[in-house]
Image (cartoon, rainbow, N blue to C red):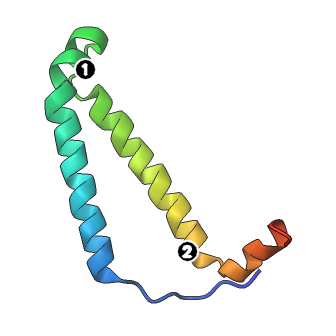
Amino acid sequence: MHIYRARLDYTLILAIAVLLTLSVTFIYTASSTKALENFGDGAFFLKRQALRILIGGLILYLAMRIDYHEFLRFAPL
């Protein structure tokens, strides 16, 4: 397996970070009352979404570090 350093598109990373921040904010403001009533924690859905964002970011980072040609072994043509 070949691991290499990819050049990052910082504009794309910034756009994704802004969208993720807005989405987490909207989830919190829209669901905090319901989460407090049902789960006793106003930030219940916020924490779940943040955890999923972190897991997705980790998977994205790992996939980014692997040369995409390596995936061809798993998808024979």
In the image, what residue occupies the spot 43% across and 44% down? 52
State the image coordinates of residue 73 (x, y, percent, origin top left): 83, 73
- Examine the rendered structure and indicate whether residue 73 appears above or below residue 40: below
Label 1: which residue? 41
**Picture quadrant of residue 13:** bottom left
Q: Quadrant of the C terminus?
A: bottom right
What residue is drawn where x is 41% and y is 43%?
51
Residue at the extreme top: 37
> Where residue 21 sits: x, y (%)?
22, 53
- Quarter-of-image position of residue 17: bottom left
Residue bearing the label numbered 2: 64
Residue type pointed to by label 2: Met
- Residue, x 21% and y 16% (percent of image)? 34
Name the residue: 66% across, 83% down: 3
Give neighbour class at mark 2: few <14, some 14-19, many 20+ (Cα, 10 Å): some
Q: Is residue 46 left or right of residue 4?
A: left
Q: Earlier in the sequence, mark 1 or mark 2?
A: 1
Q: Nearer the viewer, residue 70 or 5?
A: 70
Amino acid type, callout 1 = Asp
